[in-house]
Amino acid sequence: MPNGRTSTPRVPPRWFVRTAWSVHRGLYRVTAGRFGLWRPKAGRWGTMRLTTTGRRTGRERGAILAYLEDGPNLFTLAMNGWADGEPAWWLNLQAHPDAVVTLVDGTHPVRGRAAEGDERAHLWAKWREVDPDLDAYAALRSSETALVVLERG
């Protein structure tokens, strides 16, 4: 591994990951959005709220996600806490690509899609700069982790 580690990275238990997500969403709601979102900085990802349309219900669904920027676009990983299976927000976005992101500076319409080929390699490398263990974490999943581009409208 690039950082000299020889063991598989440790992921917190699933109950802990789900509790952390719930607490983060709860703090965002309770503070009316004043807490829970931040911009990416050098060597650190930011957080955004992504609102998708439910693929079965047609209702709005929200998720708070880590993201990085690439020009005007945002990108994130559909990783489901490094567990197997696709996160619901990604399944929703595949069915209904038009969505809304809420950032520190406001709300913006976006259109989601999976990065492929050279674009995927470029964005994966940018994410690896923030998390040198990215490849080891991704190897924990039985399928490729989608790299999702959110193009601003």
Image: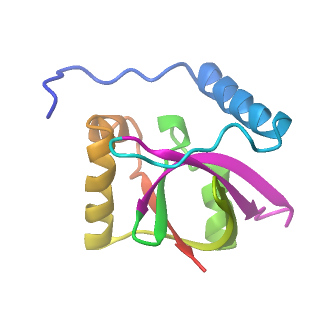
Quadrant location, the C terminus? bottom right
Total labels: the figure holds 0
Residue 23 coordinates in the image, percent (x, y):
72, 27
Instruction: Using the image, determine if residue 29 lies above or below residue 88.
Output: above
**For this view, does 28 lie left or right of residue 11?**
right
Q: Is residue 64 magenta?
A: yes
Q: Nearer the viewer, residue 104 or 111?
A: 104
Instruction: Using the image, determine if residue 28 lies above or below residue 100.
Output: above
Q: Which residue is drawn at 38% across and 35% down?
A: 140
Q: Which of 148 and 100 is in front in this view?
A: 100
Name the quadrant containing residue 15.
top right
Stretch in magenta: 44-69
Instruction: Using the image, determine if residue 131 lies above or below residue 75.
Output: above
Q: Is residue 57 magenta?
A: yes
Q: Which of 140 and 70 is in front in this view?
A: 70
Name the quadrant containing residue 152.
bottom right
Residue 54 coordinates in the image, percent (x, y):
78, 62
The answer to whether residue 1 is seen in the rendering is: no
Residue 3 coordinates in the image, percent (x, y):
16, 29
